[in-house]
Amino acid sequence: MTGKRGNGEGSIYPYRNGFAAYVWVETPDGRKQRKYVYGKTREEVHAKWIKLHGEASRGPVATSVPTLAQYLARWLKEVVEPDLKPKTAETYAMHVRLYLVPGLGSKRLDKLGVRDVRAWVNGLLEQCQCCAQGKDSKRDDPRCCAVGQCCRQVPSRRTVQDARAILRSALTNAMTEELITKNVAGLVKVRSARRTQRHPWSVEEARQFLEAARAAGDPLYPAYVLILVLGFRRGEVLGLTWDSVNLDAGEITVQHQLQRIRRQLVHDETKTEASAAMLPMPAICVAALELRHNEQEVARHAAGQLWSGSDFVFTTRYGTPIEPRNFNRSFAARSAKAGVRRIRLHDTRHTCGSLLAALDVHPRIAMQILRHSKIAVTMEVYTHVPSEATRKALHKLGKHLGAPSTPHGK
């Protein structure tokens, strides 16, 4: 075949060891530019040229396409960080760094196909992340993968689902920016993981834990009360400030959380508006917070000029915020000392409803605390009947301690 152009092929010409062609297109930023296609034969280039003409007729076409890694870096900076909560943005960045870029980052965005994503998903489900990330080799004393004894630290199916969902979200934005025409991640499914069965504490175990913490004078005892009785999350209880507490009215407002994000403690609003609420406090919560207020005043006077002056309810002896991971460690240590099963801190939320029933909290108030939309849902948690001894012990913990030594003024 000669190198002459055929009829209607205007822009096809010999190029190196094959052929090339271009079409004038409008780019996403409104400029007119040439878009090139290449191939080994005239027929191959002609087919690409026709396809490119079709794309140009339908709308803007990108003339230079970044790799997935390049695009994800820009997406995180320009879309994710400004639009999402800091903790969510940090989670997205972690999945991009650990799973997306190593597996697919070198692929050009418009060349990423369904088979590429499916192969990545399948590989991720079987790949030891200790090997992939060099975790063991970074230790001063390697003990598994770096010494030839793979620990098989494969990601959970839920982790793989999350990574695929983040890729799909990024590619959806790429479609919006008209860099690609279809979302290949949306065409690849990951089978749902079996839901892990949680075994939260019974009312008796929660009572044993609280009694032990109170008897030991644990400064975090009031925090444990809020977590178990009101269902506070870790970030919510550590981010609680005194201006959100009204001891006289027996009300508490959930509106902020404290989290460590990118090596910094961030005090921010709760994740969603639905998470923010004003809750009535049972007597045990009021008594615990009165106790906390008294103890904090003692600590404030003892610290003197070293006191940080923060308004947090739960602080160190110098008034600084409590490190979230340290709170987890304290909870685990207190559980061991109390002689109760070790559970995840988050699982305490599942004990909340049963404790409210044991404290004789009216179902309508419990419904408000548990944030249920229907009373029937609340009544389902009132099926557990604790022993009379447990009921009396919890009511004893809920007795008011009398007026605080200094006015709380909240």
Image (cartoon, helix red, strand yellow):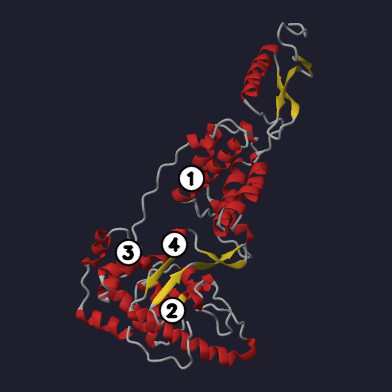
Disc with the residue nearer the chain's start (2 vs 4): 2
The Cα atoms of the two marked residues, 3 and 1, are separated by: 27 Å
The Cα atoms of the two marked residues, 1 and 4, are separated by: 33 Å
Disc with the residue nearer the chain's start (3 vs 4): 3
How crowded pointer 1 is (Cα within 10 Å; few <14, some 14-19, many 20+) is rated as some
Residue 232: % across, % down: 42, 69
Q: Amino acid at mark 2?
A: Asn
Q: Quadrant of the N terminus?
A: top right
Q: Which residue is mark 2?
A: 246
- Closer to the camera: disc 3 or disc 1? 3
Q: Amino acid at mark 3?
A: His
The Cα atoms of the two marked residues, 2 and 1, are separated by: 50 Å
For the residue pair 227 and 375, the one nearer the viewer reads as: 375
How crowded pointer 4 is (Cα within 10 Å; few <14, some 14-19, many 20+) is rated as few
Q: Which residue is mark 1?
A: 125
Q: Amino acid at mark 1?
A: Leu
Q: Quadrant of residue 208?
A: bottom left
Q: Is residue 13 left or right of residue 266?
A: right
Disc with the residue nearer the chain's start (2 vs 1): 1
Q: Secondary structure at mark 2?
A: strand
- Closer to the camera: disc 2 or disc 4? 2
- Closer to the camera: disc 1 or disc 4? 4
Q: Which residue is mark 4?
A: 275
Q: Amino acid at mark 4?
A: Ser
Residue 174: % across, % down: 60, 38
Q: Which residue is mark 3?
A: 199
